[in-house]
Image (cartoon, rainbow, N blue to C red):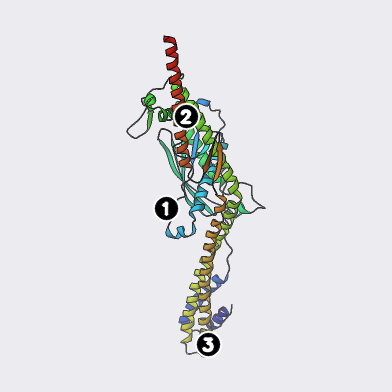
Amino acid sequence: MPFIKALTTMHASLPKSIRCLSACVLSCLLLTACNAPIQVKSTTYTPLQLENEDITEAELLDLGVMAFDPGLDSLSDKQAEIVLPAVRVAEGHYLANQLARTIQDSTAWGAVRVLPSSDVITDVYVEGIILHSDGERIELGITVSDTSGQQWYQRSYTQEASKYAYDRRKSLQRDPFQGLFNRIANDLIEYRKSLSGKEAMSLRNISTLRFAKDFSPDAFDQHIEADRKGVLKIKRLPATNDPILQRIQRIRERDYLFVDTTQEYYDAFSLQMEAPYQSWRAQNYDEVLATRHLKRQSRERTIGGIVTVIAGIVAASSNSSATRAAGAVAIGSGALLVKSGLAKKGEAQIHIEALAELGESLQTEVEPRTVTLEDQTITLNGNVQAQYSQWKELLQKIYAAERGTTLQNAATGNAEQSL
């Protein structure tokens, strides 16, 4: 670079008091001139722990994963500028489904589903919030609780992706953050092992009674109660041949069918989203690293340029004509370096805008889907919770109709006997 050569010439003719400053300037410029490569991180992969012991049907707990909170309310103003809400919402569903698949693969649980609503009754609930997600790093907040209302634990999980995770030549054909999902699933297994068989069966019974109470509160209100902390406890169990309970169990099987069909939607959604989402992640990864590199380079060049201008001004005030000439060159070169630094900031802003544009390209991949359930067509248009609420209302009507028919048949039978 010409100003480095000029500064070197100027350095020899400067008074001793200025040479120290000149040397510092030259060092700064040499550092900024070195175009350091973008750092590539490698990460340690955590394998999935499998349940090797057989678990009896009575102790096998069903688990539901809620669609993750996109974390939009916790974003800073700076983060909000580059995070698209629609993309984060889509991520919340995609990541929840990835976690549900991983938990199911551990073979430690019964049915594992992504739940359309917190109103779905199951044995164990996993809730999550996206604290950070940019292709390079994911941070999730995970809360686990059970059907009784007892919280198991609340933890945060973070993982950085390696550049190789997005390299097709070196990719292991797994999610770049699969190790994070494995860690969450492994922690769930460890906590599950701390429960006794009796405690597991109690949770299954509480789920059954909760569902039954929703449909027939008069018949099942006295079977469970909440303690001072709001945790449900079983007071007494109904008879296994209780006709009301058997009828409600049939209703619950229909509820399972709805949730299973919803799971098919989430699976199809994830399959449709996977290719563009992984491409978006990979590009985001490059954009994040490039932006960070440009900001660092911009800062170094700007500082180096300012110092060069200062040194040039000092040299220009020297009595030596050669030193003054070298100082003038240094001032001009330093100004160019400051301008270069500001240009780098503008280039970084372009990358930030590119992040938002890449996110917008995903919006076409998250359109609502329509699924057919028995004789009904249900549209999942982003408000799955409302759809499930309507489904529960329909189940209530089905139960009331079946119960009315049963009561009518019983009354008819009694009348025929009296005749």
| Element at label 1 | helix
- The outermost residue toward the right is 169
Q: Amino acid at mark 1?
A: Ser
Identify the residue at horizontal 53%, vertical 88% (top origin). Answer: 322
Q: Which residue is mark 2?
A: 398
Identify the residue at horizontal 53%, vertical 78% (top origin). Answer: 336
Q: Which residue is mark 1?
A: 74
In the image, which is nearer the foreground, mark 3 or mark 2?
Answer: 2
The image position of residue 208, as x and y in percent, is: 45, 28
| Element at label 3 | helix
Q: Is residue 319 visible?
A: yes
Q: Amino acid at mark 2?
A: Ile
The image position of residue 203, as x and y in percent, is: 44, 29
Q: Nearer the viewer, residue 140 or 382?
A: 382
Q: Nearer the viewer, residue 150 or 350?
A: 350
The image position of residue 377, as x and y in percent, is: 54, 39
Label 1 vs label 2: CA separation? 42 Å
- The outermost residue toward the front is 419
Say whether disc 3 or disc 2 marks the residue closer to the N-terminus.
3
Vertical placement of residue 207 versus 181, above or below: above
Vertical placement of residue 199 versus 286, above or below: above
- The outermost residue toward the left is 228
Say whether disc 1 or disc 2 marks the residue closer to the N-terminus.
1
Q: Is residue 103 visible?
A: no
In the image, which is nearer the foreground, mark 3 or mark 1?
Answer: 1
Q: Which residue is mark 3?
A: 325
Quadrant (top left/top right/bottom left/bottom right) for the N terminus: bottom right
